[in-house]
Image: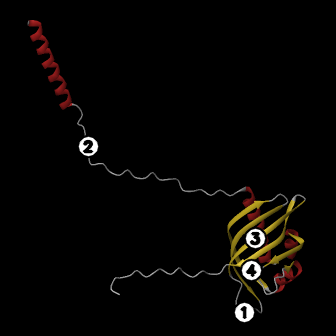
Amino acid sequence: MRIRSFLCLYAVLLLGAFMYAQKTGTPQPTPAAPQATPKPQRPARIVTRTRLVSIFSGMENQLFGDVQKKDKAALTQLVTDDFAIWMPNDTGDPFPLDDWLQSIATDYNLKSFKITHMAAHDFGEVVLVKFEVNQKADVKGKKGDESGQYFVVDAWLKTGDSWKLSDRYISKVAATPAAKVPVKPTGKD
């Protein structure tokens, strides 16, 4: 019997010490109402220039720079002998190299340009390069100016160790009207 009372006393003391330790330990925070966890932020999309875009971006900028400087010799080094510009016109005929060079030398004045949204696709001996160009330009003797945004597709042909521009397809980007917002019914009609 003595052992039983001693065990009970020991259990009570142990239980008391355990409860005392719970009260004097570090305070536990009271659980709050569950809150929505914020969405983890995804890193911003990083657009990396491809090797072809880097190469042809430089060549396109050089070409436009040579047009701006009216440098006929430099332009003829960048294009093939049968180079032509294709654009929407009444006849559907291309604008040949000789006429283009003559126009640049006499009538066409490129004041500024900026190339954006470039992509390039390699087909082996030909690379197609598409981009948009915003330019300020005018043509002598022509009403209005040639400023605006243009969509361009260039076909670059591999000739030996270098690339030459073979054909250019260009069209002015028309301003699109703003979309009409449907009128919400008020219920009073």
Image quadrant of residue 169? Answer: bottom right
Q: Amino acid at mark 4?
A: Leu
Q: Earlier in the sequence, mark 2 or mark 1?
A: 2
Front in this rendered view, residue 125 or 102:
125
Q: Which residue is mark 3?
A: 153
Q: Which residue is mark 2?
A: 31
Q: Which residue is mark 1?
A: 143
What's under tag 2, amino acid-wise?
Answer: Pro
**Mark sitting earlier along the chain (3/2):** 2
Q: CA distance from mark 4 to mark 2?
A: 69 Å
Q: For the residue labelled by badge 1, is the local secondary structure a helix, a strand or a loop?
A: loop
Q: Secondary structure at mark 3?
A: strand
Instruction: Please name the residue that numbered disc 4 is placed on.
Output: 110
Q: Secondary structure at mark 4?
A: strand
Which percent across, then down, holds residue 138?
Answer: 73, 86
Return the x and y of residue 163 as percentages of the image width and height. 84, 63
Query: Of the residues shown, which amino acid type is indicated by label 1?
Result: Lys
